[in-house]
Image: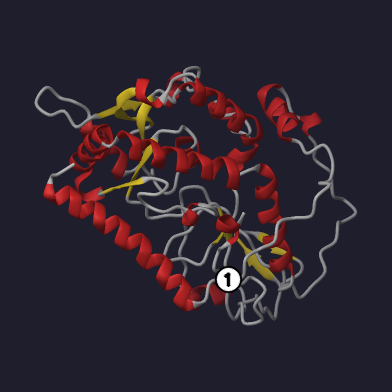
Amino acid sequence: MGEIASDGVDAGSSSSPTVVSKKPAYISGIFVKNPGVPIFLSVFLVTLFVTAAIFTRWVDVVIIPPLFHYCGDDGTYDIVFPDWSFWGWPEVNIKPWVQLSKDLEQGNLKKKWTEREPFAYWKGNTHTGKARKDLARCNPDGQHEWNARINHLDWRKGFKDTDLASQCTHRYKIYVEGNSWSVSEKYILACDSMSLVITPHYYDFFSRGLYPTVHYWPINERNKCHSIKYAVDWGNKNTEKAQEIGRAGSEFIKNELQMKYVYDYMLHLLTEYSKLFKYRPFITKNAVEVCSCLDKGMVKEFKEMSKVKGPSEASPCTMHPPYDAAELQSLLERKLNLTRQVETWEASGRV
């Protein structure tokens, strides 16, 4: 569990920012009775940036604390939190992770790596994000063979043919971000295929524990097609090493991303964050408990499938301490050097 837990963030630090308000807060018409309560606004695909000077006209605050979010990047302080797909995504026919991870393991057994298609595979909506639109150009066009098989998925036609466990049929699978990070990363890494990761700009709560040429192969975003072709050519010539990278990525997902550890991460994170509170949360008299019995169809099925039947019999895993500055710098340099090594190989053209 160490690589998931090594987040480099000390949520319990006394120097962490907290909301300090002197008057009731009005946000978008919502009246917040307790002005000391951190406000979490989750906006899908749209982020509203308001300068501190303007914002403090509405809420008298010293500083806004970091928000929980499914992903973060180098320019934000968002606290990464497991995304919804771990509990299933019924709208696109993706099962809860507790079941899907088992299905993917079984799917891997259907075809040996050496018997899989010797190309790089990706399936998804090519209209979400510039990187995906650019990736679509890497399909064979009669003049160029980039060793890629890019399949556009039209969401308007439904998701009957999107069974992820049946898509582990290629030696290489591509991960590319959309408008931001994508939930597909864990599904791609779990396939035993060598994952080709196009330069990511976002991270989720586990991906910073992955290393290029160890768990995946880095793809240069500025020259995707050429970079993908080189990666596939290299893998088809160095099959044992390519299989080793594919297995390492899958083993990371299998061992480090068990639901037990996902819940452990959530427990540790919320426990540390709660130490920052200047108030004691309580359940109001009018609160209504929500349960899966209120849902229907696949939504209810997935909630029942992912429901925890009882408390864990084992104690939560032990969190590693945050990295100090030197350790973090060493980790980042190692990743950068491994990526640069691949870029040097690409530039030479030798596989």
- Residue 58, image x and y in percent? 59, 72
Residue at 12 percent of width and 29 percent of height = 144
Q: In this view of the protein, can residue 284 be seen by the observer? A: yes
Q: How is the image coloured?
A: secondary structure
Query: Which residue does the numbered mark 1 point to in the structure image?
Result: 322
- Where 100 falls versus 338 (above or below)? above
Q: Position of residue 211 (x, y in %)?
A: 41, 54
Quarter of the image that includes the C terminus: top left
Residue plotted at (43% across, 60% down): 73
Q: Quadrant of residue 280?
A: bottom right
Label 1 crowd (10 A; few <14 / some 14-19 / many >=20): some
Q: Is residue 203 left or right of residue 67?
A: left
Assign a secondary structure to mark 1: loop
Q: Nearer the viewer, residue 334 or 82?
A: 334
Asked whether residue 175 is in view, the answer is: no
Vertical comparison of 195 with 23: above or below: above
- In the rendered structure, the answer to whether residue 177 lies left or right of residue 98 reads left
